[in-house]
Amino acid sequence: MLFTHTHMNALASSESAAAPDTIPLSEPRLGGNEWKYVKECLDTGWVSSAGAFVDRFERELAGYVKTSFGVATVNGTSALHTSLLVAGVAPENEVLVSGLTFIAPANAIRYAGAWPVFIDAEPTYWQMDPERVVDFLEHQCKWRAGRLYNRVTERQIKAILPVHILGHPVDIDPIVEVARKYDLAVIEDATESLGAKYKGRMVGSLGDIAAFSFNGNKIITTGGGGMIVTSNEEWAVRARYLTTQAKDDPVEYVHNAIGYNYRLTNLQAAMGCAQLEQLAGFLDSKRRTASGYAATFKDQPGLSTMIEAPWAESSFWLYTILLDGTHGHMDSRALLGGLQAVGIQSRPLWRPLPLNGAFRNCECSPCPVAECLFRDALSLPSSVGLSDENREVVTSAILRILRDAR
Ligand SMILES: *Cc1c(COP(=O)(O)O)cnc(C)c1O
């Protein structure tokens, strides 16, 4: 059984009754001021969409990723949708997006009425391949009267949406460079990579606007929540306007655009402030888990691990390995089954987006690298605070399963 992205924590806990030793993939850690700050909301009555914690969470998160403005949203998907609208993405435009990612960014492109163009992953760090981005824009598009058009569909290309998957940054400089050349917006999906750095710069500050998520399985959580960050003041103002029902007069109910109710509550932001206080420790814990796994799996035949680029500082959101599956080696789904049998949760990467029926009407080119990664990858338990002892339970189970299969 595969666990869905959003529900894996719920499943991990509700099914733990059947398997008391379950080690979940990723569960939230709530050991700081969460209770105190949420209680403060309840005691003062500031429980809804305005309040000091919302302002503080926006200010602190934007400051942490070195951007000027933050706009809190109800989840990461709405942060992506709003970012696309603010960047001027309109119906029948096209947006280049990673082909190997959770589906939310591609759905958000469709919410804006635009079409995704899926870009394959590179095989080393598994992120959006900048060479393919440049190649597509230079050779499959044409520049006419200051706009870039897809030669095949004749649609205008408006933006690039790189997704920093699994905690590791995309090699984004060549992407930003080609975006500048053709006047395209760069929208970062930073939902899985809070705290990661690219050439010393914070993920979320590398393009024109970025989206974060605080779902229960992410690096920090507000239960559910998201944030738009940008250093473009006009865009920040527009994002706040669109996420709060596009009110043009605070009293008289004047609305000159279609807005959305995408606000985060003060209760959720209170959790966010408490989580943010612990982020440095969370990142240390993720890195410790990653190096523990990497040390054990070094030189295992048929198994390779995720690596960190020399220009990157990963936040190691979900530690992921590849199972070769050929020459008599075990494949990823067999290992998943073996781990499940002993109460250890693991999960493959996402089906490449062009293979999903949801995008059957898109002009899709294949993503062969993403298809190999989908076949071979398995993410392992990576919760903040995973003890060395539990990590060793996982690694010795894997080594034993692999040995038994030989
Ligand atoms: C989690 C996630 C999202 C969406 O976040 P929600 O808060 O669940 O809406 C978007 N993109 C990626 C890559 C994600 O992993």
Image (tube, rainbow, N blue to C red):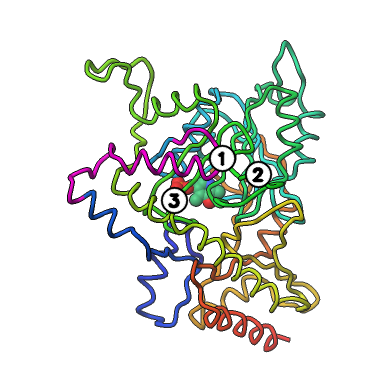
Task: Give above or below for 264 relative to 250.
Answer: below
Residue 349 horizontal side relative to residue 249, left or right: right
Q: Residue 176 versus residue 85: which sits nearer the camera?
A: 176
Q: Are marks 3 and 1 in contact (CB under 8 Å)?
A: no
Q: Which mark is residue 66?
A: 1
Magenta segment includes 64: yes
Residue drawn at x 30%, y 43% as measured from the top left:
265
- Asked if the residue at label 3 sits under 8 Å from ligand 1, the reply is yes
Task: State the CA–CA distance, disc 1 to disc 2.
Answer: 8 Å
Magenta segment includes 268: no
Residue drawn at x 67%, y 55% as measured from the top left:
313
Q: Residue 340 versus residue 251: which sits nearer the camera?
A: 251
- Residue 214: x %, y % from top left: 44, 51
The amino acid on which the numbered mark 2 sits, given as a three-letter code, is Arg
Mark 3 — residue? 214
- Magenta-tinted stretch: 42-70
The amino acid on which the numbered mark 1 sits, given as a three-letter code, is Lys
The amino acid on which the numbered mark 3 sits, given as a three-letter code, is Phe
Q: Are marks 1 and 2 in contact (CB under 8 Å)?
A: yes
Task: State the CA–CA distance, disc 2 to disc 3.
Answer: 21 Å
State the image quarter where residue 289 is shown: bottom right
Residue drawn at x 77%, y 33% as measured from the top left:
136
Mark 2 — residue? 201
The local crowd at label 3, few if under 14, some if 14 to 19, many if 20 or more residues have their Cα within 10 Å, is: many
Query: Which mark is nearer the camera, 2 or 3?
Result: 2
Task: State the CA–CA distance, disc 3 to disc 1.
Answer: 18 Å
Q: Residue 187 versus residue 365: which sits nearer the camera?
A: 187
- Residue 306: x %, y % from top left: 70, 63
Q: Secondary structure at mark 2?
A: strand
Q: Secondary structure at mark 1?
A: loop
